[in-house]
Amino acid sequence: MPPHPNDGDDFGSPFFDVRLRRARLGLVVGLTGIVMIFISFSSAYVVRQGLPTLDPRTNVLLHDWFPVPLPRLMLINTAVLLISTITMELARRHAARKVALGELAAVPGVSVNAEEKVSWLALTVVLGLSFLAGQWLVWRDLAASGFYVSTSPSSSFVYLLTGMHGVHLFGGVVALLTAGVGSLLHRRADSQSIVLDVTGWYWHFMALLWVYILCLLEFVH
Amino acid sequence: MADGTGGRETIMATREIAAHEIHAHAAPQGFIRKWVFSLDHKVIGLQYYFLALTAVFVGMFLSLLMRIHLIWPNVPLPLLGEIKPETYLSLLTMHGTIMVFFVLTTAPQGGFGNYFLPIQIGAADMAFPVLNMLSFWITFLGYIVMLSAFFVVGGAPLHGWTGYPPLSALPTAGPGEGAGADLWVISIALFCVGALMSALNFITTTLDMRARGMSMMRMPLTCWAWFITAILGLLAFGVLFSAGILLLLDRNAGTSFFVPLVVVNGQLAAHKGGSPLLWQHLFWFFGHPEVYIAILPAMGLCSQLVSVFSRKPIFGYKAMVYAMLSIGFLGFMVWGHHMFMSGMSPYTAFAFSVMTMAIGVPSAIKTFNWLGTLWGGRIRLYSPMLFAIGFVSLFVSGGISGPFLAQPVLDIPLHDTYFVTGHFHLIMGVASIFGIFAATYYWFPKMFGRMMSESLARWHFWFTLIGTYAIFMPMHYLGMAGATRRYSQFTELAYLRDLIPLQKFITYAAIVTIAGQFIFLFNLFWSMKYGKKAGDNPWEATTLEWTTATPPPHDNFAGRTPTVYNGPYEYSVPGAPRDYVMQNDPTTVAAH
């Protein structure tokens, strides 16, 4: 009988590819949930733009949607995040290679050098945190120019969308840190690789989501 | 009843495929790891179940207080004293919220789904056990936060389980709309997070952990129902979560997503330009699928039980699957029918109306298939079957008023009356509760190794069936006579005076029905200790949970992974040695 995915019955399955596939499937399902959250915000964003508001003094319906001038810094942040997806991808591939070479190294007489020169994982964490710090500066910029959360409906959405994205990206940073700590403690390389693989795809998705949010804020107003 | 040996033989027949299979987390020993922070889907299922059990009694108590207040408006109540209109609204809000979220969403899916989905598909656990544990504890936290709303300044919120702004968005809008409403929103957001994580687990488990031979179309219909429910949850709870975040910002950060220019208690609120309709759209985009999240698991279970206790294959297995899929799909297209009263273009209303009535088609398919399964079956009227048939009855009686309310021209006069209260309690509330009861009586022997008392179960069934009809059927008449829902007092209203006897009747029926639930509670706990010992397969059913020990071991199949050779409803198979063929029984494959 051919091997069946359920042969190793769950996350402790001895089969690396079964666990990897299961984790990836879980990620895709989880991202669907996240997509729904941002679809809701997007639809609220579009609907809110078209709503008139009553001016109590003149009793006239007005439009109160004034686009917020986005700080330049946002573009730099975007560049940082996009670069981090490259380092993330390198870290992901490196971890996968380590698992593949690990099997090879088990063969007597074969020596394998699986060490990387640059810790792509650490670099990704640093870039991710720089992006988040940059977003914080963007918020400060916005506040300095008089746009607070409640100033106008458009500024509410800027804070909301950047904030929600930041929270999700921070989740990715935490996952990377757990993987990093795990590898420092010399946990099983294949478990680290699965965490890094899933976080890698999550990270790419977060970058894509950020580009989408940026386009929404920049072009749909 | 069978002597319970049937399952044993099939355990022997289970082929050991791979001896190396090891369960990822060994059975824990300490009390905390075993019963509190457990990773075992069975323990987590029981935790969800008992959470829902406490919640249902809280919710029921609140409804009792409301019913008593409605007919004796000036009598001070225990714990609450005099009921002011706003107290009544708090009771109403908390009753609805606790029942919808912490009972109807929690017990059928989180409780029974967690316990039996992995076993029925032949897996050792859910795909992500740690995530599963977190889902429960986040839900539990949400429940505690929800209950704590009773005990803050101003008390529990007034805005109903639907939380319509501006009432829900303005802390000054009334007592209970301050801290109480914040806690309500936070609790809902927590519940959403827990439900999303749980949905992720259910979907991955169903797609990726089925045993050898368990193709999707060999899954019991319960598994299909949990799977489809999880998909609905995944797509719906994110939307409610977003809406909750926006509401929290409106309440606490001064934004105006949902709040228009509005005067509250003579003061102009500091908001403008928001749209209460935006909330309603987001809420009902979640809220309508939520109705199916509550009812689909009961549908799956009903299909299962009707087949088991009629000793017949389910009539139209594939039709049942496609009907559930289309109910789930259409469920996302009809949210507008909750908003006919909120102002909507007649063309939009027409579209929502047609889509809503279209749901009648798959619902009717399911009903006819249940009846078709019963037809000519050798029916064994044990308590799970009684409740399954009760479910079909309530589903039809509650569902039939759906097409009425789906039409704007009828909905507009009926919407804010007891007609709607009667409708949704029958179909979403009690029908789903009947599913929970049926599941409890059916799976109790597997979960606790003993049988529940059959005679007490019968008493409980007749009390509950007659009781719920006595409560909710008259509400339709109240509604048609114009009795408005959500009002705390109408004994003073001249045009409703003639209906007071009917209101009194409903309250008496409610008191009796609620008293009847203590039969169930007693039976549940008494049978855990003193019930008759159950065999491994007391109902002579075919699905995988009846092939394993009672209660199932930590990894469900004690180191073996079952292989599935048959569909889930092989009853009265011609040529088979018994009138049922277990799913993992290879010997009778050739016979049919």
Image (cartoon, rainbow, N blue to C red):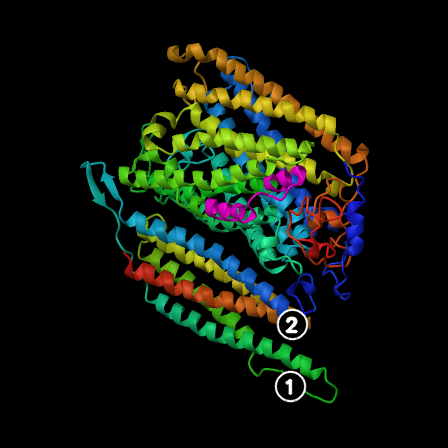
Is residue B339 depicted above or below A215 in this figure? above
* Residue at horizontal 58 percent and vertical 37 percent from the top: B103
Residue B158 visible in the current orientation: no
Q: Quick one: SS at disc 1?
A: loop
Q: Which residues are magenta?
A: B302-328
* Residue B242 image offset from top left, x and y in percent: 44, 48
* Residue B390 image offset from top left, x and y in percent: 59, 30
Query: What kind of residue is marked 1?
Result: Asn
* Residue B235 image offset from top left, x and y in percent: 47, 50
* Residue at horizontal 73 percent and vertical 29 percent from the top: B454
Is residue B293 depicted above or below A23 in this figure? above
Q: Mark 1 — residue?
A: A113
* Residue B412 image offset from top left, x and y in percent: 34, 28
Co-location on one chain, circles 2 and 1: yes
Q: Is residue B265 left or right of residue B512?
A: left
Label 2 vs label 1: CA separation? 16 Å
Please rate how many residues cluster around mark 1, counting C-alpha atoms within 10 Å: few if below 14, some from 14 to 19, many from 20: few
Residue A80 visible in the current orientation: yes
Looking at the rendered image, the quarter that the N terminus of chain B falls into is: top right
Q: Mark 2 — residue?
A: A190
Q: Nearer the viewer, residue A49 or B566?
A: B566
Q: In which image quadrant can residue A146 be found?
A: bottom left
